[in-house]
Image (cartoon, coloured by chain):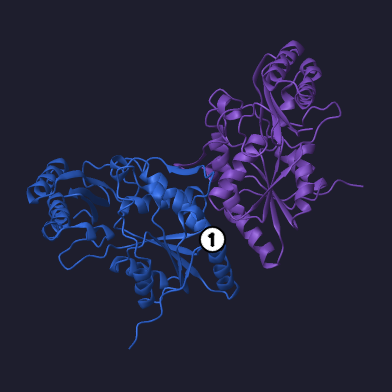
Chain colours: A blue, B purple
Amino acid sequence: MTAPAPTPVVHRVSDLRAQVAAWRADGLRVALVPTMGALHQGHLTLVRHAFTRADRVVVSVFVNPIQFGPNEDFEAYPRTLEADRAALATVGASLVFAPAAAEMYPQGFATAVTVAGVSEGLCGGSRPGHFSGVATVVTKLLLQTLPDVACFGEKDYQQLQVIRRFVADLDIPVEIVGVPTVREDDGLARSSRNAYLTAEERGVAPTLHRTLQDTAQAIRSGAAVDAALEAGRRALLAAGFASVDYLELRAAEGLAPLAALDRPARLLVAARLGNTRLIDNIPVQGA
Amino acid sequence: MTAPAPTPVVHRVSDLRAQVAAWRADGLRVALVPTMGALHQGHLTLVRHAFTRADRVVVSVFVNPIQFGPNEDFEAYPRTLEADRAALATVGASLVFAPAAAEMYPQGFATAVTVAGVSEGLCGGSRPGHFSGVATVVTKLLLQTLPDVACFGEKDYQQLQVIRRFVADLDIPVEIVGVPTVREDDGLARSSRNAYLTAEERGVAPTLHRTLQDTAQAIRSGAAVDAALEAGRRALLAAGFASVDYLELRAAEGLAPLAALDRPARLLVAARLGNTRLIDNIPVQGA
């Protein structure tokens, strides 16, 4: 059996809108899956999930410059559009939207969408301006596409909460759906940045998820939250992580810091392994 | 002949969307005219203009708290919904959308739309946060209504430029139309805030427009821009204005400050008369 033809791609907002309008005229429901490309099984799972909610699925592929800090990996971030189109064809994605930076941010661009509260601390603490960059580009992608539904991975849990917040606040007419994280067999969350890891680092990386599980178990068993988090940080450093940006227990909705497991919670971590920053999170329910 | 029935009003976003969806199903074009109520002939002209571009015209009436500074006139701003509905009926407006503050900004609201460049200086200088409040509420109103076209008065010229900027930047699918300022016979720009003026102040107020005209004439005739603006400021103070927030020559598109009349320009003024802050602006074309 031959591989399916790569998913069709458009680069202009006007072409995206024309295709979505044609689908609408046929009474079809449309989903959007925003990505930065370098697609892996996690993204393909988002597309499969999107097809349970819509007839056509648009996947945007855009490495968004304004969500990277000056010392981050914008230049190094993998760009693999042809491989992405081939992978998307295996799950039947309907269209790739891959705009150039000048299509998204033409000369004179001057607007930002910012979200207080939920975007502060965690990744918002270690990556200033990151969530404003995310909120701005996702607002644009949603208003360019005007989908019925948009799917995002829970792997970027704080991002998902930020998106839910501004979509509600700005009355963007779309349903936001979070999809559980897809993991390797050893528990490592799928991430385009895993490609940065050396073989040795790849061996250490699953400690991130294991530490989340161990810490959650300790908290569920009644350990003091602060002590459990401190033990988790020490375990990461002992395993070979260079530093821990954060390991925190937060409310699952709204991300308020929690000193005790008194409501549905999320345990979130970001840590550096060599030059690579990895993030992960898991739900923590009370006993 | 009896007065027409007041324009129908809805207070909920869901009711607004249901009405707009019904019009869309009938193939009708929809316009939005955002206002803060206290409607005058300027607003009614916006509605008439909107009917040249659409089959149905929604007028929003919402005194937006987040565009007022802490020492501004939010509490005092006139609220005259029943008179507004009666006035709108005389021009055939289709629907009034008059949300409560809690409908627009429910508990937990945390998002802002900000615009750099064009929102800086002028009213953005004397009213910090004002244009972010405007951009945020207009984004909401546009996404709640999803009109084909939205009409704004040129009286708030910087606001119009800010709106054009973020609508383009965020890809909000609407056409923005600016409508020339409506004036009293003596030249005073129609404004809801004119109601604040004492009889004596009302006699002084037309000096604002006359000074714009005189200053523009001087610049067109070759006077140095700085000297002409300084003469204009002195004229306003001499006429009885308490202070001049600004009197500036700016590029008509993008509002860059101009030292000479080397492109289509706008002359903009804000000045205080007693406790009332009045603004106005006129186009200045080279000879």
Estimate the x, y position of residue B63 in percent, counting from the top left: 62, 36
Estimate the x, y position of residue B67 in percent, counting from the top left: 57, 34
Residue drawn 23% across the image and 54% down it: A280
Is the residue A199 above or below the residue A114 in the image? below
User: If the image is split into quadrants, where does the C terminus of chain A sit?
Assistant: bottom left
- Quadrant assignment, res B226: top right
What kind of element bears circle 1? helix
Residue lying farthest to the right in this orientation = B1
Residue drawn 70% across the image and 34% down it: B265
Using the image as rendered, state which of residue A34 and residue A121 is in the foreground: A34
Q: Which residue is mark 1?
A: A13
Using the image as rendered, state which of residue A248 and residue B228 is in the foreground: B228
Q: Amino acid at mark 1?
A: Val
Q: Is residue A13 left or right of residue A53?
A: right
Badge 1: few (under 14), some or many (20 or more) residues near its Cα, within 10 Å? Answer: some
Q: How many marks?
A: 1
Using the image as rendered, state which of residue A138 and residue A149 is in the foreground: A138
Estimate the x, y position of residue B272 in percent, counting from the top left: 67, 19
